[in-house]
Image: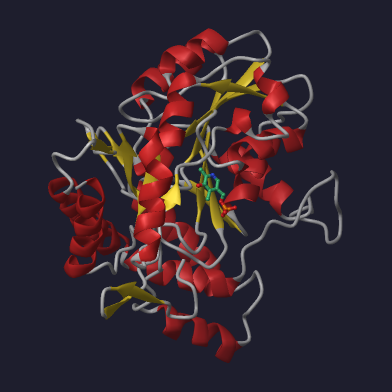
Amino acid sequence: MTSPSRQLAKDGAKALPFLPVYRPDLSGNERDYVLRCLDTTWVSSKGEFINRFEDEFAKYIGAKNSTSVCNGTVALHLALAALGIGPGDEVIVPTLTYIASVNTVLQTGATPVFVDAGEVDWQMSVDGVRQKLTRHTKAVMAVHLYGLPCAMDELTELCASNGVYLIEDCAEAIGTLYRDRHVGTFGDFATFSFFGNKTITTGEGGMVVARTPELLERAYHLKTQGVSREREYWHDTIAYNYRMTNICAAIGLAQLERVEEILERKRVVAKFYRDRLDGLPLTFHDELPATRHGFWMCSIALDDETNRDPLRAFLREQGIETRPVFHPAHRLPHCEHLARGERFPVAESISSRGINLPSFPGLRTEDTYRVCAAIRRFFK
Ligand SMILES: *Cc1c(COP(=O)(O)O)cnc(C)c1O
């Protein structure tokens, strides 16, 4: 997200505006809908926008059962909890992911089992998943990293034939298609995040999508303190308050009205990067056949990892913010022991060479041009 102070870049004599990696576009009905919450006093987790946002969201991705939550991390925890995953269970996760995918498994008491990434798509390797299946495997968590989908035909088939649950972490992948079908409609559960830098935002927020009404009911029960639908203040289990507020849902509904427009603008940005960076010693994290890349982040991997930090420093000097690709989870202090000494060479390589470029929908052509020109100057 953008820093509130509009930092100015020193680029010769001319000061150019700071380009953040992300800045949400709230120029639709967000303001009107939020004011309606304030005017009607429906500011908490009841109100018209909650149901409307949940229904419209499900309709958009082509699902039937969805419930909103207060962030994408608790969405994952709720899905795992609703499936009854806990101590003694193994959940197969990619090591190249945002930490929430791994931490939520740890929070249930289950064991995350890591899988390496694919060189081209950066997604969890299906062969890797196959090799990690044991009689303790309870679920596979497919994370659609940076907006490209995992190999869902292979993963759904593998999970079905082995009797393990499939959870999709779609935090980075609203609008991502796999064979013309939205991600989030393949798993027993799917989760989304609406953090400020995600493709659509509610400030903080998330969504849980379930394959069946029964699974949704279990998630809803755990989300709402385990309270009975019939009897007031009657709670029958240890549960959580993971509810979204009406104000967040109001922002979400307004964002959802423009999601295809936002995605289209991100595609234009991605195409510009792809074309203008062609021929440099780097690879653009591009769309693959039979997919629609959501381009949550426009990412590149440099051929030579020793250029990565110098390029980022060079861009920062010109007022261009970038992010490094995530550290593989097995390299983080509290997860290292889970890898039991195993190496994940592809994830490690992508992580050491990868950069997320400014990727927000409001990026203008001249901004994208400026980023590409700076990268070209670096390689001269
Ligand atoms: C952002 C993200 C999450 C967590 O979402 P929050 O809303 O920030 O809690 C989970 N998984 C992945 C892959 C993410 O990128």
Left or right placement of residue 210 versus residue 29 in this view: right
Q: Residue furthest bottom?
A: 39
Q: As rendered, which of 253 and 369 lies closer to the eye?
A: 369
Q: Which residue is painted at 40% across and 29% down in the image?
A: 123
Which residue corresponds to the image point at 54% horizontal and 29% vertical from the top-left? Answer: 95
The colour scheme used to paint the residues is secondary structure
Q: Position of residue 366 (x, y in %)?
A: 18, 69
Q: Is residue 174 visible?
A: no
Quarter where residue 268 is shown: bottom left
Q: Nearer the viewer, residue 329 or 46?
A: 329
Position of residue 270 measured from the top left corner of the image (x, y, whole percent): 23, 51
Across and down, in percent, residue 295 comes to 31, 48
Q: Nearer the viewer, residue 175 or 221?
A: 175
- Above or below for 302 versus 88: below
Q: Position of residue 45 (x, y in %)?
A: 65, 69
Quarter where residue 374 is shown: bottom left
Residue at x 26% of width, y 80% of height: 13
Question: Would residue 292 be found to the left or right of residue 101 on screen?
Answer: left
Q: Which residue: 67% across, 39% down?
A: 104
- Going by the image, does 350 lie left or right of 280? right
In the picture shown, does residue 358 fall above or below 191? below
Q: Is residue 285 visible?
A: yes
Across the whole image, how many numbered discs are drawn on residues? 0
Vertical position of residue 206 compared to residue 104: above or below: below
140 relative to 306 in the view: left or right: right
